[in-house]
């Protein structure tokens, strides 16, 4: 029965594959009404695939039905195929998170059902998705995993595809040597297999590396090879991609008419295909060409903004960084300096987020020039140093040499293969000729052949000796570099150890100084208090001076206490006195203590305290300090006549305290250094209250020492919510 069903499926596929696009859909819809069980699942899957190109919603509908029916029938292969194809649809729709979940589920089921082909396919798709999002670490992990799987299966074509994508990741990260090595390995495999449809892609990728290294002639040579092969194969998409790359070479040569012509031809193909990722890249390149041309800024901005729209929709962060950098340069040229700076900063932020050296280099150069022109020399120097570091990482003599070596080894390998092929052809022709000649001619020809082969062998031997000498020289250079690296590493270890010793000494000195300051400070405070108490003849101004002095001693004493607290925490000498207590009642007591401070600023402290089961096991004294610090900050940074909310709740077996203010909120830069020592944030206290910059650092240390969590949720201009959570404890 299974055999009959299987044969029926094959016949259905053969029949459908001979039909046109519209006929296929009609035939599949007819077949849907006449099929059952697993065959129906296959028809639904085929319908989903047919609709993928023109109606993603319809494709999703049929694939969802296929999953439901396959699961009902326990048809594992159908379930796996449907999940993978549905993930493709979700990705194309711009729903990256849903696609990731579906690919992950498909991979898990592939392993459960021991279907390594589908596992490899979905690993690669997930790698492509993360690559598109510039999440290079995740992408590299999935492509390496897929490569290892295909090596077990000995699927050479799939290994080549994984190598190509691994090369693309290294390319994006600026490691051109590793990128080129992977591209050439992929090229060799598919050339050996005769898979000519993939080779134009590898040639394009190799050319891109040489263009980035400013070896334009070599890049153009590879582009033209790729274009010729794509056109011979009749591959419109591959030809269009290559034309885009050639257009960029024309742009660099300021041949703008040729560049625009090639881009127009390519764009027509891509818009028909409606691939959002490709369109985002192509619109960006179109914008770059018009930006370089310099006579139509409006059109350049239009293409760049279109690119941003697609890139944001599907999470192409690298393309976003490129677009913002280009827009910044255009605004700078038309003297819209504020917009230029805003876009340059956004480009730099995204580039740093994804760790892309190319984009960091471009954005930091723009910012350096901007600040230099604005006479902000400190900022200009900062970004110029970042630019120099990125440039040195991307372009240096060592990398260029390694690239040349990789290419030379590949060329040498190719030449050896050509020679081997020619020798085999020559030998075959001679064998045929030998059969047609008599014994005497065979003898003479054999002698000539022997002499020829001896000459070739001698020539080949000399070449190999030269190559061996070159390789030996390269080996010596590598060994020398290894020794230098080892020496540098040992120096760094020594310096690191010295720094650790200095840091320890610094901490000890700070602790000693803080302790030694306390006694004289207490004496100063006592003397001021005596003068104030006994000085009946003091006028108002003198009393005010004494009050100010007392406040200063209190503030210094508070700072010393906080410094010693930090020292105690970092030396891991905290003596926690753990006990079980009700957090709600503790928080209420702390709030009551702040009534005077809140009344001074006319701030209403609103409490929402859970009255039941808010029991925690912690050090009560440290917990009170944490809550006091957060409420004090909320009052400091809140404007007059507003409200501060204090909540205690019990979500999911934990006890949570929230302190919500209506202050200025926090920028992304402030959030990154919120819980660090001695940090001053851009937001300032509203009534000139003082701050040591240690409070939140101590809060974090205390909370984590008691195995709790603390974090902040805030948007600039919309206040802040500081949250502290502990595990709920049972009543003792």
Image (cartoon, rainbow, N blue to C red):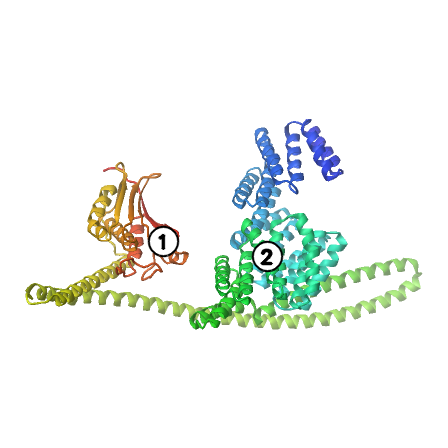
At x 60%, y 64%, the residue is: 291
Viewer-closest of 27 and 108: 27
- Quarter of the image for residue 556 reads bottom left
**Nearer-the-camera pick, 177 or 432:** 177
Residue 383 in the image: x percent, y percent? 47, 68
Q: Toward which corner of the image does residue 454 lie, by quadrant?
A: bottom right
**Residue displayed at 55% across by 49% down:** 313
Q: Position of residue 675 (x, y in %)?
A: 34, 56
- Which quarter shows the N terminus? top right
Q: Which residue is mark 1?
A: 665
The mark nearer the N terminus, 1 or 2, is 2
- Give whichever of 555, 174 is nearer the camera: 555
Residue 110 pos. (x, y %): 57, 40
Q: Is residue 2 above or below residue 247?
A: above
Residue in front for this viewpoint, 431 or 513:
513
Using residue 658 as the reference point, say whether residue 51 is left or right of it. right
Residue identified by numbered label 2: 302
Circle 2 residues within 10 Å: few <14, some 14–19, many ≥20: some
């Amino acid at each position: 029965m299974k055999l009959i069903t299987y044969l029926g499926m094959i016949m259905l596929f053969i029949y459908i594959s001979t039909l046109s696009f519209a006929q296929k859909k009609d035939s599949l819809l007819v077949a849907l009404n006449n099929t059952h069980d697993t065959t129906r699942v296959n028809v639904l899957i085929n319908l989903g695939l047919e609709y993928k190109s023109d109606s993603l919603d319809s494709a999703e509908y049929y694939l969802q039905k296929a999953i439901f029916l396959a699961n009902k029938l326990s048809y594992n292969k159908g379930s796996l195929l449907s999940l993978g194809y549905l993930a493709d649809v979700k990705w194309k729709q711009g729903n990256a998170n849903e696609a990731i979940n579906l690919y992950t589920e498909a991979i898990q089921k592939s392993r459960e059902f021991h279907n390594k082909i589908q596992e490899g396919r979905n690993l690669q798709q997930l790698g492509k998705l993360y690559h598109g999002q510039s999440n290079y670490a995740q992408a590299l992990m999935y492509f390496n995993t897929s490569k290892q799987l295909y090596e077990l299966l000995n699927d050479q074509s799939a290994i080549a595809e994984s190598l190509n994508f691994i090369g693309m990741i290294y390319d994006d990260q600026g490691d051109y040597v590793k990128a080129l090595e992977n591209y050439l390995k992929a090229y060799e495999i598919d050339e050996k297999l005769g898979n000519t449809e993939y080779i134009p892609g590898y040639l394009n990728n190799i050319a891109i590396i040489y263009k980035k290294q400013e070896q334009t002639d070599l890049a153009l040579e590879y582009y033209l090879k790729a274009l010729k092969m794509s056109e011979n194969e009749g591959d419109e998409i591959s030809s269009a991609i290559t034309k885009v790359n050639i257009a960029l070479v024309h742009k660099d040569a300021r041949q703008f008419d040729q560049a625009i012509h090639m881009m127009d031809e390519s764009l027509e193909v891509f818009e028909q295909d409606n691939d959002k990722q490709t369109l985002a890249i192509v619109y960006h390149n179109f914008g770059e060409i018009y930006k370089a041309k310099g006579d139509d800024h409006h059109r350049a901005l239009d293409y760049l903004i279109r690119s941003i729209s697609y890139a944001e929709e599907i999470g192409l962060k690298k393309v976003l960084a490129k677009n913002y950098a280009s827009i910044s340069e255009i605004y700078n040229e038309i003297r819209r300096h504020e917009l230029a700076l805003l876009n340059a900063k956004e480009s730099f932020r995204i580039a740093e987020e994804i760790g892309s050296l190319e984009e960091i280099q471009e954005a930091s150069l723009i910012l350096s020039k901007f600040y230099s022109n604005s006479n902000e020399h400190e900022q200009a120097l900062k970004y110029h140093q970042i630019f120099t570091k990125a440039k040195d990482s991307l372009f240096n003599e060592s990398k260029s040499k390694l690239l040349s070596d990789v290419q030379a080894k590949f060329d040498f390998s190719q030449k050896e293969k050509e020679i081997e092929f020619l020798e085999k052809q020559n030998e075959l022709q001679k064998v045929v000729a030998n059969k047609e000649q008599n014994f005497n001619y065979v003898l003479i020809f054999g002698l000539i052949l022997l002499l020829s082969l001896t000459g070739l062998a001698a020539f080949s031997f000399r070449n190999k000796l030269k190559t061996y000498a070159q390789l030996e020289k390269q080996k010596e250079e590598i060994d020398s570099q290894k020794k230098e690296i080892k020496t540098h590493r040992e120096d760094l270890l020594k310096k690191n150890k010295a720094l650790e010793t200095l840091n320890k000494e610094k901490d000890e000195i700070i602790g000693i100084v803080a302790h030694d300051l306390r006694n004289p400070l207490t004496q100063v405070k006592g003397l001021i208090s005596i003068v104030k108490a006994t000085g009946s003849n003091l006028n108002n101004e003198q009393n005010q001076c004494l009050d100010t002095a007392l406040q200063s001693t209190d503030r210094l004493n508070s700072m010393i206490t906080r410094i010693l607290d930090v020292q105690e925490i970092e030396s891991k000498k905290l003596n926690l006195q753990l006990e079980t207590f009700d957090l709600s009642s503790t928080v209420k007591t702390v709030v009551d203590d702040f009534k005077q401070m809140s009344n001074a600023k006319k701030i209403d402290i609103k409490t929402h305290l859970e009255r039941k089961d808010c029991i925690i096991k912690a050090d009560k004294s440290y917990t009170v300090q944490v809550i006091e610090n957060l409420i004090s900050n909320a009052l400091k940074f809140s404007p007059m006549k507003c409200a501060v909310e204090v909540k205690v709740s019990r979500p999911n077996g934990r006890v949570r305290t929230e302190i919500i203010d209506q202050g200025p909120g926090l920028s992304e830069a402030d959030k990154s250094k919120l819980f660090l020592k001695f940090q001053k944030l851009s937001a300032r206290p509203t009534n000139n209250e003082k701050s040591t910059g240690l409070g939140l650092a101590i809060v974090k240390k205390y909370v984590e020492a008691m195995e709790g969590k603390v974090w902040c949720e805030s948007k600039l201009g919309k206040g802040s919510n500081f949250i502290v959570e502990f595990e709920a404890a049972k009543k003792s």
